[in-house]
Image (spheres, rainbow, N blue to C red):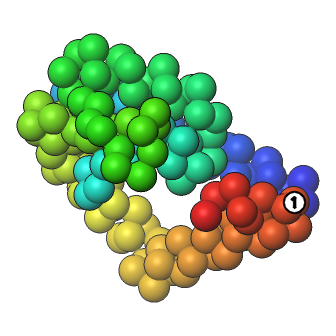
């Protein structure tokens, strides 16, 4: 367990550092990119974004408010819940994320070349399985959907 946790903590730091490098040139942070990425397909309430990311609603709320303040996202009415507005990217927010795509794709290609396509895909499957198992054994499966 300790070896796995330490490996995941290190990997998290490596991913965050890589994300910062990719996001910085387009005026985003890794956290802003992550929140915008969560709502690119469909608008979500802040609590839904937090559940998907496995972080607190308060931390997402701070980022969401900054994104709205900078014109990268906007709040919209939520037909399912009057007080929990939906967060959606603006055209400017979508454009910023799109500008990250070439660097992101290049990093993914380099990782796939290093690991091999099959091992890279298996790594993702194992991490997803580990996350689901941890949710189950800690009783958090309902919290993340």
**Residue 54 can be seen, yes or no:** yes
**Residue 20 can be seen, yes or no:** no
Which residue is rendered at x = 49% and y = 26% of the image? 61
Where does the image place residue 115, in percent across and percent down from the top left?
47, 72
Taking 116 as reference, is 140 left or right? right
Which residue is rendered at x = 48% and y = 74% of the image? 120
- The number of numbered badges drawn on the structure is 1
Q: Is residue 25 above or below residue 122?
A: above
| Rendered-image quadrant of the C terminus | bottom right
Which residue is rendered at x = 29% and y = 31% of the image? 75
Residue at far bottom of view: 118
Packing grade of label 1 (10 A; few <14, some 14-19, many >=20) is few
Taking 87 as reference, is 130 left or right? right
SS state under label 1: helix
In the foreground, 15 or 136: 136
Q: Is residue 137 above or below residue 65?
A: below
Where does the image place residue 128, in percent across and percent down from the top left?
61, 70
Where does the image place residue 71, in percent across and percent down from the top left?
18, 21
Where does the image place residue 81, in percent across and percent down from the top left?
45, 45
The quarter of the picture where residue 89 lies is top left
Disc 1: which residue: 138
Q: Is residue 100 above or below residue 144?
A: above
In the foreground, 87 or 94: 87
Which residue is rendered at x = 11% and y = 31% of the image? 92
Taking 57 as reference, is 94 left or right? left
In the foreground, 38 or 6: 38
In the foreground, 145 or 108: 145
| Rendered-image quadrant of the N terminus | bottom right
The quarter of the picture where residue 72 lies is top left
Taking 77 as reference, is 18 left or right? right
């Amino acid at each position: 367990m300790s070896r796995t946790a330490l490996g995941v903590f290190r990997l998290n730091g490596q991913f965050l550092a890589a994300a910062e490098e990719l996001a910085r040139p387009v005026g985003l942070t890794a956290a802003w990119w992550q929140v915008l990425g969560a709502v690119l397909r469909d608008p979500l309430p802040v609590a839904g974004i937090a559940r998907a990311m496995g972080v607190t609603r308060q931390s997402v709320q701070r980022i969401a408010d900054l994104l709205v303040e900078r014109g990268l996202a906007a709040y919209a009415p939520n037909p399912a819940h009057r007080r929990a507005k939906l967060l959606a990217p603006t055209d400017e927010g979508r454009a910023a994320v799109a500008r990250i795509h070439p660097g992101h794709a290049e990093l993914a290609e380099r990782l796939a070349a290093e690991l091999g396509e099959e091992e890279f895909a298996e790594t993702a499957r194992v991490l997803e399985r580990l996350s689901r198992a941890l949710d189950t054994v800690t009783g958090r499966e309902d919290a993340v959907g």
